[in-house]
Amino acid sequence: MDSFPVQQETPEKKFLKERFREYYLKNLEPPPDITKREFGFGFEKKIDYRHKSFRSFQEFSEFVSREVPFFISYSCARYEFPSLRPMDRKGYLGSDLAFDLDRTYLEEKHEHSPVLCNYCLNRIRQDAVNLIEEFLVSDFGFSREEIQINYSGSKGFHIHLQSKPVQELSQEARKQILDYISAAGLDVEKILRREKTEEAGYILRGPTKHSEGWAKKLFDAAFKLVSSENLEDFAKDGIGKVKALKIMDNREYVLKKMEEGNWDSLKGLEGVWNKLLKKTVQLREVEVDRQVTFDVARLIRLPNSIHGDTGLIAKKIPLSEISDFDPTREAVAFDGNKMMAIVTDKEFRLEMLGQTTEIKPGKNKVPLPAGILLLCKKKALLYPE
Ligand SMILES: [Zn+2]
């Protein structure tokens, strides 16, 4: 394959390229079916060039060592002729199912760090676990073995499913999956409905302990709250003391009736239930980048490649380790014992590999991973030695 046009080579870029090259000589990993994937590469932005393909892993690996892109992406789709354009000449063969969880939680109160925010990352991690456990495994019946998760190298996580049946999912099916996990079109008001019964006249019917999907999630949340012996739990869900005490005094009876789908065992609680169910939906719905899942022509970061905005690895994570995954320790690509000199006009406090680095305006000697992060973020320059 031809080389790309020569990039404007600043000393910082040259330095980063050399470090990235050292990493790739040992750590490049091909996606499955590499010859059927379209690749995209970024030098200035995430994708400057796409519609590239390779005849073998060796060809790919030689290319990466020579050009050292700052971003490497590949298609979730497989094609007969991945490099042909326009898209409809490629010969679409099917596509992995991918989810991109990549957002900030600025609306939740915390000290947000624009460089690497642990709070936001933790929240996204919870979303990723929720998506896997509550939706992909529980509701859609995927096995944990076929779910691959990787850190994005920056703010979030990517989830990939690559099995044969997934390949064949139509766009409409992908859209339905997205709608389901984001609770689009789920009308809480319709989940509880007035129904006429022989013995008790109109009663409020709702999910039972045998319900499935969203109805079961809502049942479980309400059941858990009613089971609580703590007034504060009710207060957190916006339920006043009088109503909470009424529920608590009749707990066993209310729970028993709920299991049967009768949400009317105590009168006057319809508003309480509706409020609780709405809140549960907000808490459980998962916000993903819809385009990544829906648009099968999209390219996604190659797992275990380096993210050029951070110098961190888009690290594959075993499912069992997601809860403990700390990118500032486990996604670091470079030797924390090596030092480098940078110059900056700002203050930073970075935690990487368990060590804290305080950076002051001016010249700083910092561990290699911290220096590379700041160079990638364009928050510092190399200090010429
Ligand atoms: Zn944050």
Image (cartoon, helix red, strand yellow):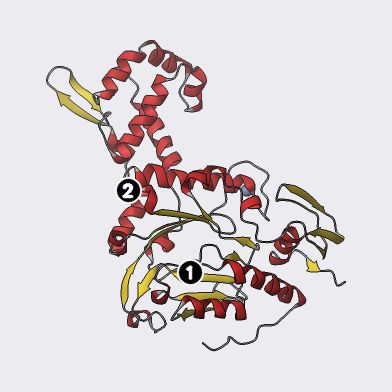
Q: Is residue 204 visible?
A: yes
The residue type indicated by label 2 comes to Gly
Please name the amino acid that badge 1 sits on.
Pro
Question: Image quadrant of residue 23?
Answer: bottom right
Identify which residue is drawn at 40% across, 43% down: 133
Q: Residues within 10 Å of mark 2 (few under 14, many from 20)?
A: few
What residue is at 48 percent from the left and 27 percent from the top? 238
Helix, strand or loop under label 1: loop
Give residue 191's position: percent from left, percent from top. 28, 36
Q: Residue 360: where, in percent of width, then height?
A: 85, 55
Residue beneath label 2, please?
A: 185
User: Is 13 located above or below residue 328 in the figure?
Assistant: below
Q: Which residue is mark 1?
A: 30
Give the percent coordinates (x, y) of residue 328. Answer: 66, 51
Residue 218: mark: none
Q: Quadrant of residue 255?
A: top left
Using a 10 Å C-alpha cutoff, classify the residue at mark 1 as few (fewer than 14 neighbours), some (14 to 19) or many (20 or more): some
Residue lying farthest to the left in this orientation: 198
Q: Secondary structure at mark 2?
A: loop
Seen from the viewer's position, the closer of residues 6 and 345 is 6
The numbered mark, 1 or 2, whose residue comes first in the sequence reads 1
In this rendering, the answer to whether 74 lies above or below 243 is below
25 lies above or below 261: below
**Label 1 to label 2, Cα distance in Å?**
39 Å
Seen in the picture, residue 95 relative to 117 is either above or below; the reply is below
Most extreme residue toward the bottom is 2
- The residue nearer to you, when weighing 361 against 75, is 75
Give the left or right position of residue 384, taking residue 210 as reference.
right
Q: Can residue 183 be seen at all in this image of the molecule? A: no
Residue, x 47% and y 28% (percent of image)? 237
Locate the C terminus by quadrant.
Answer: bottom right
